[in-house]
């Protein structure tokens, strides 16, 4: 009798082949129900809100699909746009450094048609496109997660060029932080403060015309984080989760809270139970709010799509819409047959007041 060696790869593939998973039930978009039987495919969803990046991200993914690329090809190339963009201080090249002035990048990928397989890297230095390294971890090893020097060695083995990722703007921001950190050192603060353009961790989800799903998440992590800190972005089930039978979800914001509730996995499981993507995102956000007695002093955003092509995005803290005066979500972007567009998303709570922000403990 021939006994086939069981590996992580063929184990997951065997689960898919025998049909493990439940059929999708909910079919609703962010605001309006999708008619029963209709499918909104292909579809791109991204959490990115940076004005100079978000449309390039979704358009890149859409073009890759049009040219016959896989959902993972599309998601990876879309995230590369953000990773290589110097105006984005929270992802890849030009991202914010850690407390010692070095960039340590985190990323993860997950591919539904490959048996819901995954790969991730964390605390990776000197490589501009960490999500592409994470993909190779998935495809070229029997591991799931590489970190630090091991991840860098693996990247260089596969031809990635080691480069200095600290831009002049990021260096200035880091120096300013050092100068304002304490009144009991020898650094003096500048007269004018450098204000970087906003960004945020990037999640990209791709649903192709056949219904196959892939997701990619990438980030430089919390500004001036402790050396070696790993957030939720490279952790499968926290910063990213894909189930090719159900859908995709990813988180951005306060990573530690996402890890504590397995945010992305939880969102996908709630969709498995019949929730719409928006309902699932709200459920996860509410779970986090409840953990903090209704007064979380941080932000967290969850975006999701399902196999039918419905999507949603929810955040704990929103913003005040200038026209309506109402609380709206932090926003996200989509691209489907109607083209690229940004949507406001949904929020449970208003933004923190100045008093609340000032009450947060500082180092």
Image: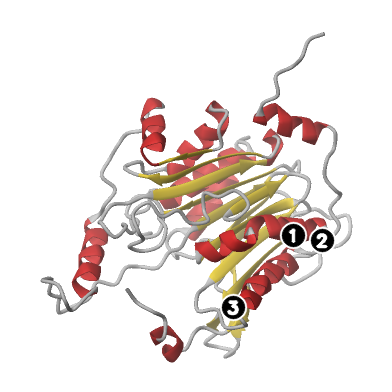
- Front in this rendered view, residue 194 or 363: 363
Q: Estimate the x, y position of residue 203 in percent, counting from the top left.
A: 55, 55
How would you rate the neighbour count of disc 2 (Cα within 10 Å): few for under 14, some for 14-19, many for 20 or more? many
39 over 20 or under it: above or below? below
Query: CB of mark 2 within 8 Å of CB of mark 3?
Result: no
Who's the residue at 77% across and 14% down the image?
3
Who's the residue at 50% across and 66% down the image?
254
Location of the N terminus by quadrant is top right
Q: Nearer the viewer, mark 2 or mark 3?
A: 3
CA–CA distance between discs 2 and 1? 6 Å
Who's the residue at 40% across and 68% down the image?
198
Residue marked by disc 3 = 292
Q: Dot 2 lies on which element?
A: loop
Q: Earlier in the sequence, mark 2 or mark 3?
A: 2
Q: Estimate the x, y position of residue 230 in percent, counting from the top left.
A: 45, 53
The answer, for residue 178, to whether it is visible in the render is: yes
Left or right, 36 with reference to 5: right
Which label is found at residue 27? Answer: 2
Who's the residue at 84% across and 53% down the image?
24
- Front in this rendered view, residue 271 or 37: 271
Q: Earlier in the sequence, mark 2 or mark 1?
A: 2
Query: CB of mark 2 within 8 Å of CB of mark 1?
Result: yes
Location of the C terminus by quadrant is bottom left
- Front in this rendered view, residue 72 or 302: 302
Which label is found at residue 232? Answer: none
Which label is found at residue 310? Answer: 1
Q: Earlier in the sequence, mark 1 or mark 3?
A: 3
- Front in this rendered view, residue 272 or 310: 272
CA–CA distance between discs 2 and 3? 31 Å
């Amino acid at each position: 009798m021939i006994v086939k060696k069981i590996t992580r790869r063929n184990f997951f593939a065997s689960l898919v082949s025998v049909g493990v998973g439940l059929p999708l039930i909910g079919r609703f978009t962010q605001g309006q129900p999708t008619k029963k039987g209709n499918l909104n495919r292909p579809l791109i969803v991204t959490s990115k809100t940076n004005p100079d990046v978000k449309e390039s991200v979704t358009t890149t993914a859409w073009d890759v699909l049009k040219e016959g690329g896989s959902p993972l090809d599309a998601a990876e190339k879309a995230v590369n746009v953000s990773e290589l963009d110097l105006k984005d201080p929270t992802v890849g090249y030009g991202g914010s450094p850690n407390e010692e002035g070095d960039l340590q990048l985190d990323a993860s990928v997950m591919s539904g048609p490959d048996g819901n397989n995954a790969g991730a890297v964390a605390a990776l230095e000197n490589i501009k496109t960490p999500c592409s390294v994470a993909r190779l971890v998935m495809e070229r090893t029997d591991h799931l997660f590489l970190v630090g020097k091991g991840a860098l060695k693996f990247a260089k083995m596969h031809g990635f060029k080691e480069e200095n990722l600290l831009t002049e703007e990021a260096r200035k921001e880091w120096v300013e932080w050092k100068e304002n950190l304490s009144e009991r050192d020898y650094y003096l603060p500048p007269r004018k403060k450098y204000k970087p353009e906003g960004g945020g961790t990037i999640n990209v989800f791709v649903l192709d015309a056949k219904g196959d799903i892939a997701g990619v998440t990438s980030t430089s992590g919390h500004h001036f984080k402790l050396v070696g800190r790993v957030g939720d972005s490279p952790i499968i089930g926290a910063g990213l989760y894909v189930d090719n039978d159900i859908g995709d979800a990813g988180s951005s914001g306060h990573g530690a809270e996402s890890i504590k509730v397995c945010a992305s996995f939880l969102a996908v499981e709630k969709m498995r139970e019949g929730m719409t993507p928006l309902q699932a995102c709200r459920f996860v956000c509410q779970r986090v709010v409840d953990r903090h007695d209704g007064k979380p002093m941080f932000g967290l955003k969850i975006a999701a799509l399902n196999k039918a092509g419905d999507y949603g995005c929810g955040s704990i803290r929103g913003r005040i819409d200038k026209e309506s005066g109402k609380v709206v979500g932090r926003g996200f972007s989509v691209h489907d047959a109607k083209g690229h567009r940004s949507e406001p998303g949904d929020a449970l709570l208003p933004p923190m007041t100045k008093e609340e922000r000032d009450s947060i403990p500082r180092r």
